[in-house]
Amino acid sequence: MTAFGDREAGVYVDQYEIYHGNANPELARKIAHWLASEPGQAEVFQFANENIFVRILDNVREKDIFLVQPTSRPVNQSIMELLIMIDAFKRASAGRITAVVPYYAYGRSDKKDQPRVPITARLIADMISVAGADRMLTMDLHQGQIQGFFNIPVDELTAVHMLSRYFIDMHLEDLVVVTDLGFAKRARAFAELVDAPLAIVEKRRHGNLDRAEVMNVIGEVRGKRAIIVDDEIDTAGTLIEITRALEREGVTEIYACATHGVLSDPAVERIANSALREVVITDTIPLSPSRQIEKLKVLSVAPLIGEAIKRIHRGESVGALFSSEVSFTQEMLLWEDGFGGGRREGTTPPALPDDAPAADDDVPSAMPASAGA
């Protein structure tokens, strides 16, 4: 407290840095590019015995650190990199550490729905907190109650506005939004944004297998164009079952969108051979060249995460990002169309913090990695 009774700001507010592990360095590069900065430098690699080594190459004392590391494939390695990097920053006397985890693995294990099973989503949350993270920034958790597993503040972003804007710009008519009960709340918001009715798919999952059977489609879908909405696409088994059910119900065209494109085998093959016109995902999880097909469209969440980072750093509202979603989502889509390592000619950079460093035309795509010792 100051002599005048005002709360004194933390020393870390003057400087912030973005770092990343090996899970999705391209997304971190885009986030830094949006903020007109560069990712910080660190070494993150595995020894021959699979032990992970981390060394921060910059002075981070009392700085505001944002560590971008989705827990995507290879999942367990990504989780360990995240935890070890958090510990490294804590021991390097970082002022505040925010774990930016666009994709939160083990999100399906959020309840004890069978005898003698773990709640792994809670376990991961405890590990992140114990490692030393001060905040958590994520996107479209499998279930919203996962936020309650953390004992640190959690900011959950959503890609619903960006995905809905993409379809609004397509000017499709006679739309119906289709989802299952688990994603119904956010799908209802999606349906309101695209001004379309909502239909619910009743499905039954067989044991612990990645396979679900569609039982019924609740709602009027005949003669309409359908947009299937979900939080993630894994093996695409459920997606294809819903697509077939909609075909039987007389839907004319079928599109799909999801925040997280996990796309485990044989998801890409299933999508390519299906009646789906287009599947829209985001880059919370990197899409390897072998999985890039014509039917897949990838939107970048880098502007959304970048704006959230800027607001967290400044102590501003993150929820306010979605109060003017129309203009902001249009800006995000246009930015992604023109992104290619440099800013589009004739455009101006987004508003930046006063302390942000100047941007370079060429931003490094990944941190330096050392060979195994």
Image (spheres, rainbow, N blue to C red):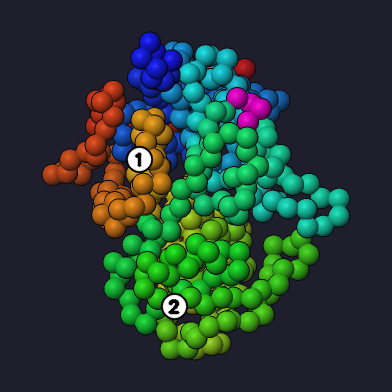
| Label 1 element class | helix
- Neighbor class of circle 1 (other Cα within 10 Å; few <14, some 14-19, many 20+) is some
Nearer to the camera, 3 or 176:
3
- Please identify the quarter of the rendering in which residue 126 is found: top right
Q: Is residue 229 left or right of residue 106?
A: left
Camera-side residue of 362 and 224:
224
Query: In the visual, does 318 lie left or right of 370?
Result: left
Residue 304 x/y as whole percent: 37, 45
Which residue is denoted by mark 1 in the rendering? 307
Q: Quadrant of residue 153?
A: top right
Q: Is residue 129 magenta?
A: yes
Q: Which residue is mark 2?
A: 197
Where 100 sits versus 134, above or below?
Answer: below
Q: In the current view of this chain or complex, which residue is farthest to the left?
A: 346
Residue 152 in the image, given as x and y percentages of width and height: 58, 33
**Residue drawn 56% across the image and 63% down it:** 183
Q: In the image, residue 281 lies at what x, y percent?
A: 45, 58
Q: Residue at x 29, y 44 (%)?
A: 340
| 351 left or right, relative to 302 | left
Which residue range is magenta in the image? 128-132
Task: Pick the residue in front: 324 or 268.
Answer: 324
For badge 1, the amino acid type reads Glu
Q: Could you give the CA–CA distance between mark 2 and mark 1, rounded to whole angstroms?
A: 31 Å
Residue depicted at x 60% and y 54%:
143
Which mark sits nearer the N-terminus, 2 or 1? 2
